[in-house]
Image (cartoon, rainbow, N blue to C red):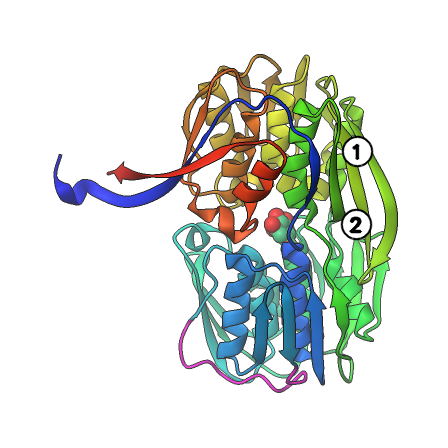
Amino acid sequence: MQADSVSAVRQAFVVHPTQEVSGEVQVPGDKSISHRTALLSALAEGTSTARGFLPGDDCLATVTALRALGVELEAQDGDLRVRGVGLDGLQASGRPLDLGNSGTGMRLLAGLLASQPFASELTGDESLRKRPMERVAKPLRAMGAGVETRSGTAPIRIVGRYPLQAVDYALPVASAQLKSALLLAGLRARGRTVIRSPGRSRDHTERLLRSMGVTVESRLNEVVSVRAPERLEPIDTVIPGDFSSAAFLMVAGLLAAPRGLLIRNVGVNPTRSGLLGIVEAMGGRVETRSRKILGGEPVADLWVTKSDLRGIEVPPAWVPLAIDEFPILFIAAACARGRTVIRGAGELRYKESDRLGVMADGLRRLGIDVVENTDGLVIEGGDLHGGRLDSQGDHRIAMAFAIAAAAARERIEILGTDQVSTSFPDFERIAAGCGIAIETTTVGKYA
Ligand code: S3P
């Protein structure tokens, strides 16, 4: 083998079967809310502060992009401080804005930059440059911005226009990223911007805009509209723990915590926490305790105990409410009694990887029977063996298979775990704190 056939050295996890998961843990701040807090605070008139900001690579890429647009931000130890420049205070960046692995950062910034009277270019890593961007480009063009993609993907070139013209737009998919991009564009459009979705999706942007003094109308979360406000008020807020990160530990608890596991301070916004309903229907025991509202978002502690899970048919309407939790749900399904059927989840093919294909492949390597359909999987619960698999650089797939070791017979090796820090920077340490021993190693990838 030639030396130059080693195309990259990648991080890998080796995870041994876990005897028991227990204790008390806290997960880092919510990724979706962290992005939105940085972006909207940048547009406020005055200084905003937030505690619980996620210092993951994705959110830090958004912070770096905002700095390049002339905004002063400090993000340290979970504290974010942003000196807002007002709705028309952004300045052109002299260079392309690199959003790394972050689809949220790229799509929301596209919405924000569409109304700026200057040109911008948005790019990202290899995975992000494969993801569909026409879905955001098309409505922004309809609002009057010049938006060019490269065969439908990033880099995206935007020639902004102010004011934009409001549109009444029906989204092709129930996507919070698209909805949020259009809400951001609508902040600087003439008329009322109306966004219609084929289903509910996370409503963090709407909540945050309201807490900054903007009137956002919303019917059943499916028709949302906004008019250009005069200004955005600065905020002083607290960002809850990320439900999507807590989901990994929650499933670990369902598989291996006979004495219980407590996950503190988790955002349980109903447009985000669909996994709670799904695991409950599977027979999973998760109690939400100490409910409260923090920074305009519902928050609770989750008390999880080992449960006998059974397979179910997941109603397609629940899919957008649990969209990021499918990799870990597939692990729960693999450990459940009977068959789990997931349909209406074709969007999973356009995430950081093709999550249906990559998860089906990994589960089969661990001895599970899986049928892969265009828009979902059928998983027969069974015994998880050990094995070696590749996350294809997808953070949530890497973490899902690490948790699978809580129920596996032998060790599981997961290649390509570098991206875990995009959403859950302390994953290995926090998992170790509740009994899941993850060794981190490096491997060469041969072309
Ligand atoms: C997100 C929305 C979802 C989700 C992503 C974060 C957001 O994407 O998968 O991880 O912060 O708005 P879609 O809107 O494309 O479904």
* Residue type of the residue flagged with mark 1: Gly
Residue located beneath label 1 in the image = 277
Q: Residue at x 55, y 78 (%)?
A: 160
Closer to the N terminus: mark 2 or mark 1?
A: 2
Q: For disc 1, does the CB lie below 8 Å from ligand 1?
A: no
Residue 146 in view in this figure: no
Residue located beneath label 2 in the image = 269
Q: Residue furthest left?
A: 2
The span shown in magenta is 84-96
Q: Is residue 4 above or below residue 183?
A: above
Q: Quadrant of residue 87?
A: bottom right
Percent of width and height locating residue 260:
75, 29
Percent of width and height locating residue 207:
79, 63
Front residue of this view, candidates 385 and 367: 385
Q: Residues within 10 Å of mark 1 (few under 14, many from 20)?
A: some
Disc 2 to disc 1, how far (Cα)?
12 Å
Percent of width and height locating residue 368:
53, 16
Q: How many marks?
A: 2
Q: Is residue 61 above or below residue 318?
A: below
Predominant SS of the magenta segment: loop
Q: Quadrant of residue 297?
A: bottom right
Residue 423 in view in this figure: yes
* Residue type of the residue flagged with mark 2: Asn
Say the numbered circle drawn on residue 26.
Answer: none
Q: Secondary structure at mark 2?
A: loop
Q: Residue at x 46, y 22 (%)?
A: 411
Q: Residue at x 13, y 34 (%)?
A: 1
Percent of width and height locating residue 215:
84, 72
Front residue of this view, candidates 269 and 183: 269
Q: Is residue 91 magenta?
A: yes
